[in-house]
Image: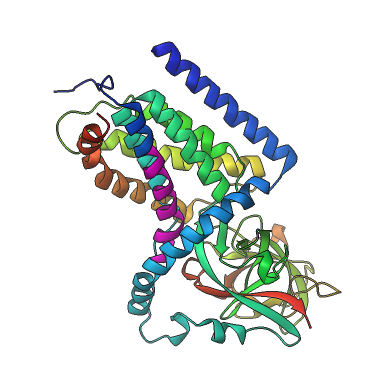
Amino acid sequence: MMARTRNTVLLLIVASLALILWDLRASDTTLRTATQEVMTPLQRTATALFSPLGAWARQVQAFDDPAARTRSAGEIALLAPGGWTGVAGRVVAADITGTRATVTIDVGRADGLTRGNAVLAPGGLVGQVIMVSASAATVQLVTDPRSTIGARVLPSEEMGVVTGAGMGNALGLAILNPAANVAVGQQVVSLGSADEVGVPADLPLGVISAMNPAPASGRAAQVRPVTSMTSLDTVLVLTERR
Amino acid sequence: MSTVRDTTHVYPPRAFALSATAIPIAVLVQTSVLPAVGLSSAIPLTFAVVCLLAITLGPRTGALAGFATGLLLDLSGVGVLGVGALIGTVLGVVGARIRVDRWIWSGVGQMWACTAAAAGGYALIDALLVGTGARWSATVWWIGAGALACCLVLLPARNWITRVVR
């Protein structure tokens, strides 16, 4: 009996290590998208059942702040910048820890989503689509430690890179020009790519909340995101430019 | 007062059915219900369930349940595939070594330590493999307090599980 247990455990450990090696080498998302297809309907149901409780709790927490209330898909669609079409999706699952910050939304390839699409919430940019299945997608939030987004600081137009730092931490902003004239309170917006594929330019990312005092690190700052990433409900995915 | 776990009367099909029901529900609650009600998905409910199954069903079932739970967590998220399965397997074996007596919360300290260590190890290994480094400010609180809450809620179900799988 003991030998049987030992063999089972050894087999499972070897299988786990093999999976780790395979995933690090192949980075294949087939298994994940298949799991997402099965889990998303269940997650959508669970979220629909329990989100009224969460919405109520958030309203109690911020009873006089209309921006904190749940928005309808119609209201969310108005967030799309000029020339872009968007699809509203609901957050049905979250994986937000100190090392990861992703959410699953209930719209996918069938709704026109592709990898790299920008995701907006009231206030501005909250993330990018990193994995898509037929009816669901995984969004990497700007607070994810793996997230890097080109940015500009207004009004000086200084360029920089915004990186995530995990749950509960401000975003990091590395400013390219060491002599840049930036200060606390200034707005940070997305840089956008030249052909405007993926993240459009000028989407609000947050506001500078503190400057890094260490002279050796050059010009670096902390940025407060546009919204709380742990209370996202309905979001808008920018799918294509008209 | 300490008693040795008796797994000789476990009826395998019932143990399998119970695990196959509890694991997806735990993953669903952790990834969807907790965030929907304003709590964090960092609360290690799934690992607490694995630990409970290991305590009541023994190391072999615990390891199998841990592997399945970790794999489902890996597939539901964007972390490195296999890390959760490895952590779950080890948790299933270690959790089965927790000795409990008749008190309903007997072993809660060890169960909390195992659950929190598994959740912390899961985040740390994943971060090291991907090269992001772990940011622990808010996560530690959610893992520690969340694991304790899960253990306190789940551990009294031990006797019920024992009766179900006979």
Position of residue A128 in the picture relative to residue B67 (left or right): right
Q: Residue furthest front?
A: B13
Which of A194/B153 is in front? B153
> In the image, is A197 to the left or to the right of B138?
right
Residue B49 at x, y percent in the picture? 36, 41
**x and y percentages locating residue A137 in the rendered image:** 62, 62
Q: Residue furthest right?
A: A195
Query: Vertically, is B133 above or below A238?
Result: above
Q: Residue at x 34, y 76 (%)?
A: A56
- The answer to if A25 sits in the magenta stretch is no
Q: Is residue B73 above or below residue A113?
A: above
The secondary structure that most of the magenta stretch takes on is: helix
Q: Residue at x 69, y 77 (%)?
A: A189
Which residue range is magenta in the image? B19-37
Magenta-drawn stretch contains B27: yes
Task: Residue A183 in the image: state x and y as whole percent.
Answer: 65, 77
In this rendering, the answer to whether A140 lies above or below A234 is: above
Count the marks.
0
Q: Residue at x 27, y 19 (%)?
A: B8
| The C terminus of chain A - image quarter | bottom right
The answer to whether B50 is drawn above or below residue A32 in the figure is: above
Give the image location of residue A230, x and y in percent: 48, 66
Q: Quadrant of residue B157?
A: top left
> Which picture quadrant has residue A73?
bottom right
Q: Is residue A100 visible?
A: no
Q: Please name whichever residue, A131 or A145, is drawn nearer the observer in this view of the structure.
A: A131
Question: Which of A160/B72 is in front?
Answer: B72
- The N terminus of chain A is located in which quarter? top left
Residue B97 visible in the snapshot:
yes
